[in-house]
Amino acid sequence: MHEIEQHQVIISQASLKKSLVKNEIDKLVAELINEEKKLATNHTLLIFDTEAAAGIIHLKACIRFAIKSFKDNTNIAKNLNAEIMLYLSGNRQISKAFPKVGITPSTKKLLMLQIVNFSTNLNEIKQFNFKVFFEKLGIEIQDSKMNIDEIEVDNIEKVLKNLEISDEVIHMYIQAKSFSSADFTIIEKLAIEKSALLNLEK
């Protein structure tokens, strides 16, 4: 469990056994909204494509940016989950952000977030059961990992493309075609910088 700006954040990850079609995605989003409404008002739920994040540090930075935007009344979206997706995409238009970082028929891995604002003196946080949620929808998942500290990113190229980080900028730091752990650290810093620019554009 992570603590970000007086919010407890539980990050989980799972792989889809098969790709979802548009109707399944629409139903998933609608049902997740319904589940969130059943929880206390200080709860936020979000499911999106793993390849939206360059790593755990990038994801936590985007969550922090989104929370602070609501505190500072500079938010673009009406709710926290949508605001997080804007920062992940590095785009201030929701219509453009969702296709980049949301669930699509090409999504293979999912990231699931449960965010709880504990500034209201919440004593205990009950973890939302995403496994049961998927079972109810008939969506088969595998390799699920709940409450994780690291994110497995398989397609870093897609992450960079989503954030519209130019090849020129990347090659300033990376000379080899294969990425090392040090390269991933640099890429994650680039991703955070790109997401942070959203604040300056507001």
Image: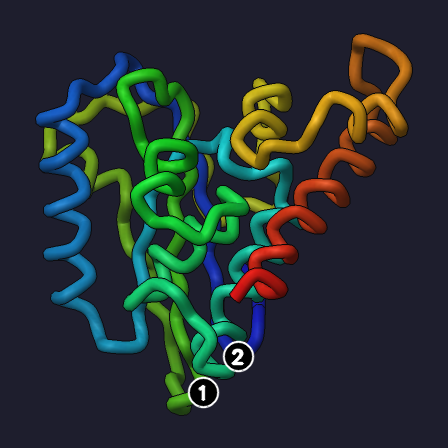
For the point 31% across and 76% down, the residue is 42
Q: Is residue 73 left or right of residue 16?
A: right
Q: Please give the name of the residue rendered at 57% of the width and 57% of the height, measured from the top-left corner.
A: 198
60 on left or right of 169: left
Disc 2 secondary structure class: loop
Determine crowd level at label 2: few under 14, some 14-19, many 20+ residues with C-alpha closer than 10 A.
few
Q: Residue at x 35, y 57 (%)?
A: 81
- What's under tag 2, amino acid-wise? Gln
In this rendering, position of residue 94 left or right of residue 26: right
Q: Which mark is residue 6?
A: 2
Residue found 44% across the figure and 43% down from its top: 12
Q: Position of residue 111 (x, y in %)?
A: 42, 39
Q: Residues within 10 Å of mark 1 (few under 14, many from 20)?
A: few
Amino acid identity at mark 1: Ser
Side of 175 relative to 102 (left or right): right
Query: Mark 1 = which residue?
Result: 119
Percent x, y of residue 67: 48, 71
